[in-house]
Image: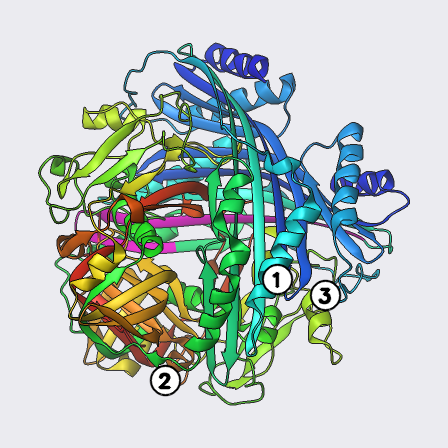
Amino acid sequence: MKTLELAERALKAAEGDEAEVLVHAEHSGVARFASSEVHQPTLIDNTGVRLRIVRDGKVGSAYTNRIGDEALAELVRRAGEVADSARPDPHFPGLAPPANPPAVNGYDEETAVLGADDQARLAAAAIEAAGEFGLYGYFTSGVTELAIASTTGVRHHQAMTDAVCLCLAAVEGKSGWSVRTSSRVGDLTPAEPAEEAAAKAARTGGAQEIEPGPYRAVLEPYAVADLLTWFAYDSFSGLGFIEERSFLAGRLGEKALDEKVSISDDALDERGLPKAFDFDGVPKQRVQLVEDGVLKGVVWDRESAARAGEGVESTGHAPPDAWKYLGPQPFALSMDGGEAGSYDELAELVGDGIYVTRLHYLSIVQPREGVLTGMTKDGTFRIRDGKVAEPLVNLRFTVALPDVLADVPGLTRDPMLVNQNELYDDRYPFAARVPGITTAKFNITGTGSGPGL
Amino acid sequence: MKALCEKAVETALAAGASYADARAVFTRRQHVLTKNGQVDDLSDSESEGIGVRVLVDGAWGFAGDRRLDEAGARDAASRACAFALAAPSRNGRQLAPVEPQQGRYETQLERDPFDVPLSEKIDLCLRAEEGMRQPQIKVTQAMVRAQREEKVLVSSEGSSIEQVLVECGGGIDASAAAGDQLQIRSYPSQHSGASGQGGWEYVESLGLDREAERVGEQAVALLTANECPAGNRTVVIDSEQMALQVHESVGHPTELDRVYGTEAAYAGTSFLKAGDLGSLRYGSDLMNITADSTTPGGLGTFGFDDEAVPARREAIVEGGVLSGFLTSRETAAKLGAGQGGSMRAEGWSRMPLVRMTNLHLEPHEGTLDDLLGDVDDGLYLETNKSWSIDDKRLNFQFGTQIAWEIKKGKVGRMLRDVTYTGNTPVFWGSMDAVGGQETWVLYGLTNCGKGQPGQSAHVSHGAAPARFRDVQVGVKS
C-alpha cells in the first residue's frame, strides 16, 4: 500500500487544485534466452507518478519517477504550468467520482517474491525441456502496482502479478511455438510450453509452398488472440467507434458473425489477469462485445463516453498513457469456447485447408472493414482429409476479421489465456482468453520464408 | 551522474564482473495533441535512473533502478551481477576491442524546443487543424513533441562519456468518412509525424499549417476515388514510403543480432547469413545504403553509442551488394569484422540492443518528374498506411494512403486502398531509378520496436523517390 501513500502524498502537494494522482510501480525480471542461453536478462525497479491538474476546465498532465518531496513539488509546478497553458475542453468529463471497485484476486505472493535466481531457474527449466532444439523466448515475472487518489475522493490500490513463459523451439528449417501465462507462477510449468514448442517444431521440416487463395483453416488460440487484439484496437474501442474507425460503427445490433461467436472483455474473470479499476480510477465492468454473432458494444473511458453523449458511461477501460492515442481498450478479451475437445477435432471439421499455430507482424490495412495482414509462423500445416498433414512455409494472410468469424464451424471447449503484453513501457500485464477455432475463410495472399532460423 | 556510474562500475567489478558499464539517463518529454479543434493531450514527463550491464564469467546481467543515488547505483550493479551468476553462459561472450573514449556530445540547436511556450505549440496545432477542415472530415488532429535526453556512460574499460540529445517533431492527420468508407491522409507521415534532432526550427521547417489544406482535401477526395486495381505494375514510391521500405527490408535484416538469432522469439531473424557479407546481391546496381550516426538532424545521431563506440558512417549495401552489418561489440567479435557502433537502449531501464541509427538510401540522379516520365503505365505511391513483413524480412506487404495513376509519364487520377507486396531481394533488384540529391528527404521515426522487454527506438532514414518494375499491387482480403 506504499504506492497509495505516495499517491496521497503527491495529492497533498497539489493542495488547492482539483487533481488526480496515479502511481504506477513495477518490480520485474525477464530472463530472455536465445540458442538456449540467457542473453538479455533484465531487472527493472521503477515507480512513476502521474499528476493531472484541472484549472478552470483546463487539464494538464505531468509525470515523474522521482518521488521525494522536492520532486513532487516540482511535479505540481509542471502540471500546473501545463494546465495553465491548455484551453478549456468542453468534452472533459471531470475527474472520476469515488466508487467501490470490485474485489478481484490478481495478486499471488509466491509470484511477487520471485527474484533473479528464480527467473533464471525457471528459464533454465524450459531450456532443459526443449531437447534437441535451441530454445528462444523468455521467462518473466513481475509485480505491478496501481494506486490512484484524487480530490474527488477516489482512493484505489491494486497489486497484480503475472508470469509468462514464452518458447520458440527452433533449428534451421524447423520451429514451433508455445506460451503459458498466469497471475500465479504455481500454475506454470516451464517445461510444458518448451515441450509443446519442440514437438511442434519437429513436424515442420521440409515445409512446402501453397497457392494463394481462400482456405478453410484451424487457428490455434495464439493466432486467435492476436487477430482479436489487433481488431480490437479500433473496432472494440469507444474512441474508434465515435471516430468511425470501428467495424462496429453503425452496425450495433447487426448479426455480422457466426452465432457460435461470443466475445466479451472481462477483467473480473479470475482465470485471466484480473483488474479492479482503470487508469481513470473507474471500476472495471464486464462488457459484452459480441453475443451469438450479434455486435453488442464497445468499451469506454470517461473521455470517449463524454464525447459520445446520449447517456454513454465509462465501462472502466481508460488505458495507460502510452496507449491513449487508441482510446479505451479491452485489456481482457475473452471469447467463449465451443464443443470441440481438441485441435484434431477442429481439423476434422475443416477437412481440406490449413492449420495455423501463430501469427507474426500484424498490421491494420483497413480499420473500418477490419482488414488485417500478417504472416503465419512456427507451425503452419496443410490439412487433408481432416488430418493435419505436411508442413507449410510461412504464409501471408490478408483477411477481414469479420469474414473470418462469419462462418466458424467449431471452437475448442476450453479457452486458453494467451499473453498479449510485449513489455513495452511500464509493465501492465494483459492477455486474451480464447479458444482455438475453425473458419471457412482465411485468405492467403502470398508465401514467405520457411520455418526455423 | 558520472560519480554514480563510476560507483556502479566499481561495485560490479568487486562482485566479480569482468566487464561493466553503467548509464545514468534523464529523459524529459513533452507532447501536445489537438483533435477536432480542442486540446486533446498536453503532457510533460520526466524519467531518470541508472542501468548497469555486466559480464560475469562470460554471462550478461542487467538491472535498472530509478534511484539516481549511491544506493540505487550499488543495488543495480549487485542485482545485475546476481542475474548473470544465476544464468551462466556456456560459451562465454567476447567484445570487439575499442579504445577507451572520453568526451561530450550535444545536439546543436537554434531554439530549444522546451523554451517554446506551450501556448505557441498549441496555436500551431490548432492553426494546422483549421486548415484541414472540410465537409466529410470526421477527425482532424495535429501533434508536436519534444524530447531531451541527458546520459552519462562509464565503462570498466575507461570510457566516460556525457551526451545531451535533443529532438522534436510534429505531424497532422485528417480522416474522412462516408458510408462504409474511411480514408486518412497524413503529413509528413502517419507515424506520429516526423521528428529530427535539433531545435524548434525543425518543426517550423515542416510547415504543418502550409500542408494542411492539401491533406484535408485529399482525405475527402479519396472517399470517391477508385480502388487500386490488382496486377503487376511499375511503381514510383515517394521518399516517405521509401524510408519505411529501407527500415523494414534493409535496416532490420542487416542487424547482426537478428542474423545470429537473438531476436528470433520476437522481432525475428534475417534472410541474411554472416557469410553473405561482400557477396550477396541485395538489389540493383543503384542500391546504395549507408548507416550514418553522424547525419545532422538524424534521430540516430550521437557522439558515441551505448557501448562507447564513436559515431561513424559506413556502407551497408554498395552497388547492390551487401557490404556491412549493423553491429554491437559482441556481434562484431563473433563475426570477426567491425567494432560495433549500433548499440542503443531506450532510457535507463533497458539493455542496449543492436539498433538502426540513421540508415539511408543514397540518392542517384533526376527529379521526381524524371522518374515518372519513363513510366508508360504505372502508379505513384505516397505515404505509408500499413506495414508488415515476415520474420526473415523476405515477404512484405505495405499499403500507402494514396496513389496516382501514371499514364505515358504523366500523373493522372487518384486511387485509394493501395497495397504492394514482394520479396526483398527481388524487389530491390527491380529498382531502376532513384531520385537525385534534391529529392532526398530525411524522416525520423519514433516507433521502431524490438527486444523483450520491448524498446522503442528513434531512428532516421533519408531517401529519395525510387522506381521499381513489375511489382504486385492491389492485394485484396
Measuring from the top left, give residue A90's x and y in whole percent: 77, 66
The label on residue B140 is none
User: In the rendered image, which residue does mark 2 sit on?
Assistant: A409
Which segment did they paint magenta? A155-178
Sort mark 3 into few (<14), some (14-19) or many (20+) by Cα contacts within 10 Å: many
Q: Which residue is nearer to you in this view: B245 or A199? A: B245
Residue A167 lies in the magenta-colored region:
yes
Instruction: Quote the CA–CA distance across marks 1 and 3.
Output: 25 Å
Sort mark 2 into few (<14), some (14-19) or many (20+) by Cα contacts within 10 Å: some
Measuring from the top left, give residue B14's x and y in whole percent: 49, 10
Q: Image quadrant for the C terminus of chain B?
A: bottom left
Mark 2 or mark 3, earlier in chain = 3
Q: Is residue B328 left or right of residue A44?
A: left
Q: Is residue A95 left or right of residue A419?
A: right
Mark 1 or mark 2, earlier in chain = 1
**Tag 1 secondary structure:** loop
User: In the rendered image, which residue does mark 1 sit on?
Assistant: A270
Residue type indicated by callout 3:
Arg
Q: Which residue is nearer to you in this view: B260 or A271? A: B260
Tell me the residue at 29%/43% (across/down): B251
Mark 1 or mark 3, earlier in chain = 1
Instruction: Quote the CA–CA distance across marks 1 and 2.
Output: 28 Å
User: In the rendered image, which residue does mark 3 sit on?
Assistant: A302
Q: Which residue is nearer to you in this view: A366 or B87? A: A366
